[in-house]
Image: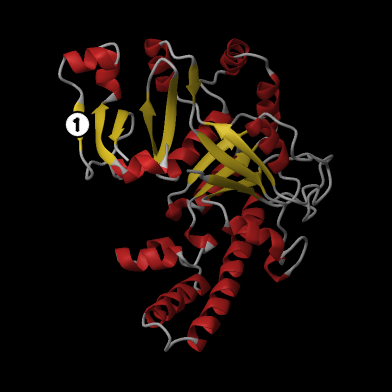
């Protein structure tokens, strides 16, 4: 199951530098001019999880395979992108395909790095992107309303879709957060089919220079105050420093470098973990001598659906899920110890897999 995070922002805010550091690659061009990213760059990133390593050691596994997230570096947007300015609607369409938006905002002064608006104003810059995303949704909604009204008598559900879209359009026009509107479960499922950018979860990433402190920056405080009513998730990083960390050869070197900065983990680790949380994802594990692997699923996923992430045959012939919690697994030294102490449960089709569950699926086809 693939979950994707799209990195957006104005040109020259550090998106491509961040992407390269995040993915430990040089896939994205990072240059001092607008639109150096033309086509979106894509890469897969491992989600750090110490639990996986511990399980693998207990099992003496030959292979330890972490779960992953997909990251996409989307070309810089500018004012008027929703009307085709800059690289225009083509790139707004790329944003529609992602599950989570990472909005990068430049929060450092540097006269040597060009700014598309000729001056640094993080609040203005942030609003340009947010407004373009909203305007893109309004264009999308108008097109969908036209099509639905043409076919209003063909399907009964079209009438309901029209009412929902009109309500969303009205609130977007008033600059209200549509995620705060009271829709029931059925309406929420319908809204998902519209593929609106405004409904996607979002993380704001404040990119600082190498010299600035992450916690004490005047621009970050301005952004926090501006977004105060929205309860946003804001992460401050330095893409320059993260690039240096990404170039280090091994974990020991990285740990020492982080320690010298007074950090417990890198900004990139925080972005990956926060993306995972923001997407409402959890991890379960399968363990064995041949392979210990982490699997990504949505919260409240039933056991048969969770098994389908491994192979669709598991769901077709699902019998039960032999399950133990991560804590019990560690406490009793693995599956054998957990079983001897009565901590292996046989769960049926209605069981909701929990974060950290160590699972063995039984199936028959």
**Residue 18, quarter of the rendered image:** top right
Q: Secondary structure at mark 1?
A: strand
Residue 120 horizontal side relative to residue 161, left or right: right
Nearer to the camera, 201 or 231: 201
- Mark 1, Cα crowd under 10 Å, few <14 / some 14-19 / many 20+, is some
In the rendered picture of this protein, how many numbered marks are placed on residues?
1
The answer to which quarter of the image holds residue 330 is top left
- Left/right of residue 47 with respect to residue 93 in the rendered view: left
At x 43% / y 50%, what residue is drawn? 231
On screen, residue 25 above or below 7: above
**Residue at image point 58% right, 59% down:** 96
Q: Residue furthest front?
A: 365
Asked if residue 292 lies left or right of residue 343, the reply is right
Q: Position of residue 3 (x, y in %)?
A: 51, 45
**If the image is split into quadrants, where does the C terminus sit?**
top left
Q: Residue at position x 60%, y 42% from top? A: 71
Residue 200 location (% of width, % of height) = 49, 56
Q: How is the image coloured?
A: secondary structure
Horizontal and vertical percent position of residue 306? 35, 41
Q: Is residue 36 left or right of residue 65?
A: right
Along the line of sight, the residue nearer the viewer: 278 or 130: 278
Residue 143 placement (x, y as % from top left):
58, 78
Does the image show residue 45?
A: yes
The residue wearing badge 1 is: 346
Q: Is residue 183 visible?
A: no
């Amino acid at each position: 199951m693939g979950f994707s995070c799209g990195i957006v922002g104005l040109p020259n805010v550090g998106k491509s530098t961040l992407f390269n550091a995040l993915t430990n690659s040089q896939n994205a061009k990072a240059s001092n001019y607008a639109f150096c990213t033309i086509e979106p760059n894509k890469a897969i990133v491992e989600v750090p999880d110490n639990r996986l390593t511990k399980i693998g050691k207990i099992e003496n596994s030959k292979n330890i395979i972490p779960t992953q997230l997909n990251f996409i570096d989307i070309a810089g947007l500018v004012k008027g992108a929703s009307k085709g300015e800059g690289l225009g609607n083509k790139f707004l369409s790329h944003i529609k395909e992602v599950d989570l938006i990472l909005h990068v905002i430049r929060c450092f002064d540097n006269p040597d790095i060009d700014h598309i608006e000729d001056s640094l104003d993080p609040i203005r810059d942030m609003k340009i992107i947010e407004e373009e995303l909203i305007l893109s949704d309004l264009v999308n909604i108008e097109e969908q309303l036209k099509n639905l009204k043409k076919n209003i008598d063909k399907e009964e559900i079209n009438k309901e879709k029209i009412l929902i879209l009109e309500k969303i359009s009205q609130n977007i026009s008033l600059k209200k957060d549509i995620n705060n509107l009271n829709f029931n479960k059925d309406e929420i499922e319908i809204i998902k089919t519209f593929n609106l950018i405004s409904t996607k979860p979002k993380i704001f990433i404040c990119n600082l220079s190498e010299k600035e402190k992450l916690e004490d920056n005047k621009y970050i405080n301005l952004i926090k105050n501006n977004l105060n009513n929205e309860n946003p998730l804001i992460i401050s990083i330095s893409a320059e420093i993260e690039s240096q960390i990404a170039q280090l050869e091994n974990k020991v070197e990285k740990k020492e470098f982080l320690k010298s900065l007074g950090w417990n983990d890198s900004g990139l680790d925080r972005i990956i973990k926060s993306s995972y949380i923001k997407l409402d994802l959890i991890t379960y594990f399968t363990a064995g001598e041949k392979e210990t692997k982490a699997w990504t699923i949505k919260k409240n996923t039933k056991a048969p659906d969770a098994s389908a992430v491994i192979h669709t045959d598991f769901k077709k012939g699902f019998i039960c899920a032999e399950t133990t919690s991560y804590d019990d697994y560690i406490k009793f030294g693995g599956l054998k110890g957990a079983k001897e102490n009565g901590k292996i449960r046989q769960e049926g089709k209605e069981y909701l897999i929990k974060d950290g569950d160590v699972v063995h699926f039984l199936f028959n086809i």
